[in-house]
Image (cartoon, rainbow, N blue to C red):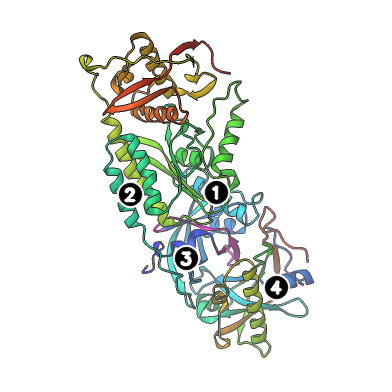
Amino acid sequence: MTRTDSAPVPLDPARIALIEGPVSLFLAGRDGEGRPTLARGSGCRVAPDGRSVTVYLVAGRAEGLLEGIRAGGAVALVVNGPATHESIQLKAAGAEVGPLGPDDPARVADCRAAWIAELGHMGYAEAFAASLVEAGPDDLVAVTFTPKEAFSQSPGPGAGGPLGG
Amino acid sequence: MSLTLDAIRPCLEGTIPSAVATCAPDGIPNVAFLSHVHYVDARHVALSYQFFNKTRRNVLANPHAAVMVVDPDTAAQYRLALRYLRTETGGALFEYMKARLAGIASHVGMAKVFRLEGADVYEVLGLERVPGPALAPAEPRPGLLGPLRACSRRLLACTELGELLDEALAGLEAHFGIRHAMLLLLDETGERLYTVASRGYAASGVGSEIPLGSGIVGVAARERTPIRIGHLAREYLYLDAVREGMRRAGPAPGLETEIPLPGLRDARSQLAVPVAGPGGLVGVLYVESPREMRFSHEHEDALVTLADTLALAFEALSRGAEGRPPPGASRPAPRRAAGEPVTVRHYAADDSVFLGCDYLIKGVAGAVLWALLTEHARSGRTEFTNRELRLDPAIPLPDLCDNLEARLILLQRRLAERGACVRIEKTGRGRFHLRVERPLELVAMPAGPA
């Protein structure tokens, strides 16, 4: 995998649509001991200028990851459209952990509903899909980062290749 | 660790995609989706290495990894802390994962994309339940120890090899509800397996053959590993794989000597288990179902254990089936066969035997039949023993661990299935009667049927 230059990756509308669509998403980093760890995201949003991404995590399910991020660790986000297998990974040297903003609970609810509907089309029961991403607003934190690199992760030999800016 | 890998094996069925996180030496993480996490044993899992990607590059430099898996029934999530140990590019684990990957790839429409380069084996350093809601399991599944016990008892009650083979398959249906099953035995060359018993098919396919290494059954035999696939895997389908193996083996001979195979056309679940005892590989027990994900890790455990019992019973009953020479005085006078004579052709090249124009059997079973018919034509004898066949130089049996008794069962069943004018009937341990109902004209052909 070739590292792209370190300029922020402005995400194009198609990438933004994928990331904000009904996707499985995992955020990875290092835990307090420096070992890799990961957590499932409950949704995400891309800033209007396409330059920063916010992932919503249930804090209690991502303690090691959040500890590592707060200590200045780098992050990697992978998203995958369950029906299309289209998948991309974004990386950043660091991220900010904070509380949800005023618009975020509604955004999380939208992500959750879209995810449940998408899995429903694939034959999964609503209760099953819901419990994977279930969270009360008080449990959630927002992890925001500016992607420095983006890679195609769609299955195949091209997986891992850098995306053009 | 208090939570064990064995306790979360349903998460490793590949139903819900997993994700793996790794770290480069500079601390930059990488995260990728995984087709499945393969259970190796209570402390190890294997991940599929398909492309030389960042995950692989990372673990070669920094062996630590983390994986998230989901229970397909309850949606409970688990995080595994792993340490990379090695990559296997051949052998039992590799072949098992390759077959499973083929099923998963076909299931998700990636049949031409997924290709296993290696099985990356990891030690499980830690396992934690990710806090969060979980659904109640749908309904408690009955355990499989009871069915296993019942089947095992049935096997140990058998006194004859033919009975043992049938009881194994009958027990699977009665106690496990497995309706489509077959038993294949390794032939004397060690390069092919032949069907000796089947259950749940329109035609038994007894006598049909499969090359070692072809399809799920052939690979399970060659690698001595169970293989379980929960989705339609076209390239491992028993029927298709065997046809392909036959096609590659060369042009079809001039005379048809292929017995149609049993098997479901679109099996969506397949499980092949080697039957091997102290004497080595005996054959393969194969079960299948039109339903997806029909067989679980527990089914694999149960059938592997049952196959072990079957192998031991098979070896014991094979050893005991020698028989004594028939007492000459009590030999009944042979009944004179009536009706139109039937021509029996024997091709020495492969010991294939044709009754009239119909192919019957080849190999050891063909040689046995030809020896019996030749002796019958010479002396009129109808009573025989396994022991004399074993000593007959015309019958090519391997020195050790021969499966003469199994070949006799095959021959007996094949004759009965064809409604042939020649039959073999067991008359005691290691003894049998040759029944000839039509006059026979024996013709020894110098060359093979091709």
Q: Nearer the viewer, residue B3 or B197?
A: B197
The residue mark sitting in front, 3 or 1, is: 1
Q: Badge 3: how crowded within 10 Å, few (<14), some, or many (20+)?
A: many
Q: Secondary structure at mark 3?
A: strand
Q: Secondary structure at mark 4?
A: loop
Q: CA distance from mark 3 to mark 1?
A: 36 Å
* Residue under pointer 2: B151
Checking the image for residue B123, the label placed there is none
Q: Start and end of the magenta stretch?
A: B16-43
Q: Amino acid at mark 2?
A: Cys
* Residue A82 vertical position relative to residue B183 in the rendered view, above or below: below
* Residue under pointer 3: B81
Lower sequence index among marks 2 and 1: 2
Q: Quadrant of residue B196?
A: top left
* Residue under pointer 1: B267
Name the image quarter holding the C terminus of chain B.
top right
* Total marks in image: 4
Q: Amino acid at mark 4?
A: Gly
Q: Quadrant of residue B162?
A: top left
Q: Are marks 3 and 2 on the same chain?
A: yes
Q: Amino acid at mark 1?
A: Ala
Q: Residue at x 58, y 79 (%)?
A: A57
Q: Are marks 1 and 4 on the same chain?
A: no
Q: CA distance from mark 3 to mark 2?
A: 39 Å
Residue B30 horizontal/vertical position (percent) = 60, 65
Lower sequence index among marks 3 and 2: 3
Which chain letter matches label 1?
B
Q: Are marks 4 and 3 on the same chain?
A: no
* Residue B268 vertical position relative to residue B79 in the rendered view, above or below: above
